[in-house]
C-alpha cells in the first residue's frame, strides 16, 4: 500500500484522488472544510463511474474507490505518506503557512508537491529547512482527464526529487513536462493566457462577437491542437516545415505580435463579455456544463487511445 496525502480537496484535490487511486495507490483526502471532503468523495465515485462507461479504467469503480479515504486530522493523513500533494487555494501566503507546517511534520525523504497553477514554489519555500524536497507538480483541469503535469523545480529542489516526481507521475499515466527553470504561470498557463488575452482584445475592440471568436478556437485551432503541438501544426502549413513557414509568414507573425500589447481586463468589460457569451450557450449551470465537458473529454481520450494504436502518435 502506497499512501498519498492530498491536502486540499476541492476541484483539483478531487481529480488527484482519481489519478492516484486509479494507479493502485491509496490517496487520503484532507481539507479544513468537512463538506469539501464529502463532496470530493462523491465526485470521485462519479468520475470513476464515468471513466468506466468510456472504457478508460482497468478495474471496477468500486475496487478503485475502496482505496480512497478521507480525514480531518492532518497528522493522521501525513503519517506514513510516501508523497504529499498540496491543492489549496492559489494564495502564496496560505501556501507558505501550510508548507511551513508540512515541512515540520513530513519526513525529509518525502516529496511535498504543490499543484499551484501560477506561483513558483520558491515563492513560499525559501525559508524552509527541507526546501530541497519541495516542487511544483501542476496538473491540467481535471487532472484525471488532461493527463499532463508540469514538473517545476525551484533553484534549490534536488535533482533526485525531480526524478522521483517524474517517475511517480509516469506511473500514474501522466505525461510529464519538466521545466528547466521557474517562471510565473509555467508553460501551460502562459500559452493559455496568451490565447485568452487575444480573445479578450479582439472582442473588446469589436473585431468579432464572442461566439464567433470562441467558434474559431473550438472548431479550428483546438481541433488540430488536440493531437499536435503548435509548432508541428505550422510545420504542416508550409512544404518546408517551420523555416519555410517563417520565410512565408514570419513578417506577419512579427507585425501582429507587435500589435498585441498587454491590456488590463476591466470588470465592466468582463461582465459584458459574459452576458454576450451566455446568450449563445445552453442555459445550464456550471457544474452541469463541467460534467458535459468531462464526458466530451472522455470520448476524445478513448478516440485518441484507439487511433494511436492504429496510426501511432
Ligand atoms: N482549478 C483549476 O483549473 C486548477 C488547475 C490546476 C491547478 N490548480 C491549482 O490547484 C490549487 C487548488 O485549486 P482548486 O481549483 O482545487 O481550488 P478549490 O477552491 O476548488 O479547492 C481548494 C480547497 O482547499 C481547501 N483549503 C483551504 N485552505 C486549506 C488548508 N490550509 N488546508 C487544507 N485545505 C484547505 C478548501 O476548503 C477547498 O476545499 C490551486 O493552487 C490552483 O491554482 C487549479
Image (cartoon, rainbow, N blue to C red):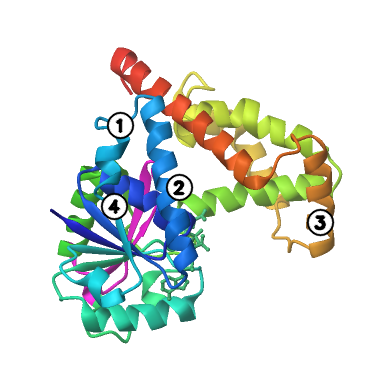
Q: Secondary structure at mark 4?
A: loop
Secondary structure type for disc 3: helix
First in sequence: mark 3 vs mark 2? 2
Q: In the rendered structure, does residue 157 fall within the stretch colored magenta?
A: yes
Instruction: Compare marks 2 and 4 and give the one earlier in the sequence.
Output: 2
Asked if one can make out residue 293 in the rendered structure from this viewpoint, the answer is yes
- Helix, strand, or loop for circle 2? helix
Magenta part of the chain: 132-159
Please state the horizontal and vertical placement of residue 98, each as a whole percent of the image. 37, 79
Q: Which mark is residue 271?
A: 3
State the residue position of label 2: 43
Q: Give the alpha-carbon distance from disc 4 to disc 3, as whole Å.
A: 40 Å
Quarter of the view holding residue 49: top left
Tell me residue 280's x, y (percent): 79, 34
Q: Residues within 10 Å of mark 3 (few under 14, many from 20)?
A: few
Residue 77 is left or right of residue 233, and the answer is left
Q: Residue at x 13, y 70 (%)?
A: 109
Q: Which residue is mark 1?
A: 57
Mark-to-mark CA distance, 1 and 2:
16 Å
Residue that mark 4 sits on? 68
| Relative side of 176 to 296, left or right | left
Tell me which numbered mark, 1 or 2, is placed earlier along the sequence: 2
Q: Earlier in the sequence, mark 1 or mark 4?
A: 1
Residue 40, picture quadrant: bottom left
Question: Crowding at label 2, few (<14), some or many (≥20) Cα neighbours within 10 Å?
Answer: some
Count of residue discs: 4
- Image quadrant in which you'd find residue 32: bottom left
Image position of 173 with respect to 200: above or below: above
User: Does residue 243 show up?
Assistant: no
Residue 206 locus on image (x, y percent): 86, 44
Amino acid at each position: 500500500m502506497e499512501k498519498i496525502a492530498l491536502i486540499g480537496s476541492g476541484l483539483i484535490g478531487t481529480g488527484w484522488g482519481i489519478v492516484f487511486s486509479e494507479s493502485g495507490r491509496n490517496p487520503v483526502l484532507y481539507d479544513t472544510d468537512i463538506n469539501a471532503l464529502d463532496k470530493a468523495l462523491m465526485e470521485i465515485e462519479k468520475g470513476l463511474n464515468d471513466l468506466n462507461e468510456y472504457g478508460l479504467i482497468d478495474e471496477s469503480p468500486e475496487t478503485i474507490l475502496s482505496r480512497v479515504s478521507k480525514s480531518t486530522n492532518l497528522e493522521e493523513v501525513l503519517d506514513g505518506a510516501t508523497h504529499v500533494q498540496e491543492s489549496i487555494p492559489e494564495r502564496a501566503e496560505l501556501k507558505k503557512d501550510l508548507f511551513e507546517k508540512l515541512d515540520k511534520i513530513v519526513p525529509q525523504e518525502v516529496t511535498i508537491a504543490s499543484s499551484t497553477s501560477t506561483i513558483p514554489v520558491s515563492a513560499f519555500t525559501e525559508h524552509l529547512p527541507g526546501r530541497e524536497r519541495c516542487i511544483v507538480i501542476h496538473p491540467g483541469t481535471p487532472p484525471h482527464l488532461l493527463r499532463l503535469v508540469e514538473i517545476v523545480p525551484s533553484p534549490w529542489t534536488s535533482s533526485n526529487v525531480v526524478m522521483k516526481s517524474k517517475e511517480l507521475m509516469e506511473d500514474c499515466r501522466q505525461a510529464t513536462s519538466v521545466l528547466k527553470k521557474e517562471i510565473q504561470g509555467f508553460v501551460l498557463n502562459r500559452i493559455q493566457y496568451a490565447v485568452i488575452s487575444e480573445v479578450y482584445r479582439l472582442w473588446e475592440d469589436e473585431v468579432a462577437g464572442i461566439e464567433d471568436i470562441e467558434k474559431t478556437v473550438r472548431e479550428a485551432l483546438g481541433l488540430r491542437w488536440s493531437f499536435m503541438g503548435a509548432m508541428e501544426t505550422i510545420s504542416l502549413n508550409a512544404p518546408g516545415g517551420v523555416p519555410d513557414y517563417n520565410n512565408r509568414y514570419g513578417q506577419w507573425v512579427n507585425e501582429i505580435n507587435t500589435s498585441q500589447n498587454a491590456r488590463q481586463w476591466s470588470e465592466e468589460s468582463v461582465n459584458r463579455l459574459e452576458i454576450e457569451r451566455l446568450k449563445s450557450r445552453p442555459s445550464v449551470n456550471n457544474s452541469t456544463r463541467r460534467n458535459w465537458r468531462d464526458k466530451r473529454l472522455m470520448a476524445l481520450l478513448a478516440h485518441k487511445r484507439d487511433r494511436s494504436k492504429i496510426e501511432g502518435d
